[in-house]
Every structure is written in structure tokens, then in C-alpha cells.
Amino acid sequence: DKALPRFTIPWQWAGTPAVLQSRATDSTGNVQPTREAVIAAKGTINRYHNPCIQSWGVSPSGEVTNVYV
């Protein structure tokens, strides 16, 4: 399938903690599942192959880290 390397959204960061998420949709309409959906279906998540929606936390200082939502 195809992926877009860049994207923009109409959002301005106000300097407060925030969580950003990205989700892919393939050409057949399948979307990435939430972390909760994968755990409910599989019981655990393999660190090597994690199909979940990707989440990033943005701290007030602007530091970006991987987070689980």
C-alpha cells in the first residue's frame, strides 16, 4: 500500500501537554486498531510487530515521547 511521508493538520500547540496519534488506512479500507482492541483480541502485544495506532506525548517543554493511550 501507499504511505504519505508528511502531513499537516490545522492545529497549533499551546504549550500544554498533548497526545498526537496517527492511524493508517490501506487501499481496502482497513484501519490500524487501537491498543485496547489488539490486547482484547491477542492478549499481548509483540514489541517487534505492533500494529496499533501510534501515539506521541508532547510535554510542556516540547519533548516528544512514545506513549500508550
Image: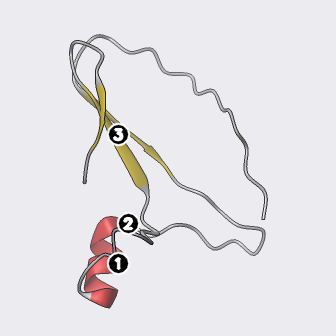
Q: In the image, residue 53 lies at what x, y percent?
A: 44, 58
Q: In which quarter of the image is the N terminus?
A: bottom right
Q: In the image, residue 63 lies at what x, y percent?
A: 28, 21
Task: Give the amino acid type for the residue marked by disc 2 in the picture.
Answer: Thr
Q: In the image, residue 13 lies at what x, y percent?
A: 38, 15
Pointer 3 or 2: first along the chain: 2
* The one of 1 and 48 positioned closer to us in this rendering: 48
Task: Give the amino acid type for the residue marked by disc 3 in the picture.
Answer: Trp
Which residue carries the number 3 mark?
56
Which residue carries the number 1 mark?
38
Whether tag 2 and tag 1 are in contact, CB under 8 A, the answer is yes
* The one of 4 and 48 positioned closer to us in this rendering: 48
**SS at badge 2:** loop
**SS at badge 1:** helix
Whether tag 3 and tag 2 are in contact, CB under 8 A, the answer is no
User: Vertically, is 28 above or below 11?
Assistant: below
**SS at badge 3:** strand
Task: Give the amino acid type for the residue marked by disc 1 in the picture.
Answer: Val
Q: Which residue is drawn at 32% across and 67% down?
A: 35
- Is 51 placed left or right of 28 in the picture? left
Which residue carries the number 2 mark?
34
User: Vertically, is 66 above or below 6?
Assistant: below
Q: Which residue is drawn at 69% across and 71% down?
A: 29
Q: How far apart are marks 2 and 1 (CA)?
A: 7 Å
Categorize mark 3 by other alpha carbons within 10 Å: few (<14), some (14-19), many (20+). some
Residue furthest front in the image: 48
Categorize mark 1 by other alpha carbons within 10 Å: few (<14), some (14-19), many (20+). some
Quadrant of residue 36 within the rendered picture: bottom left
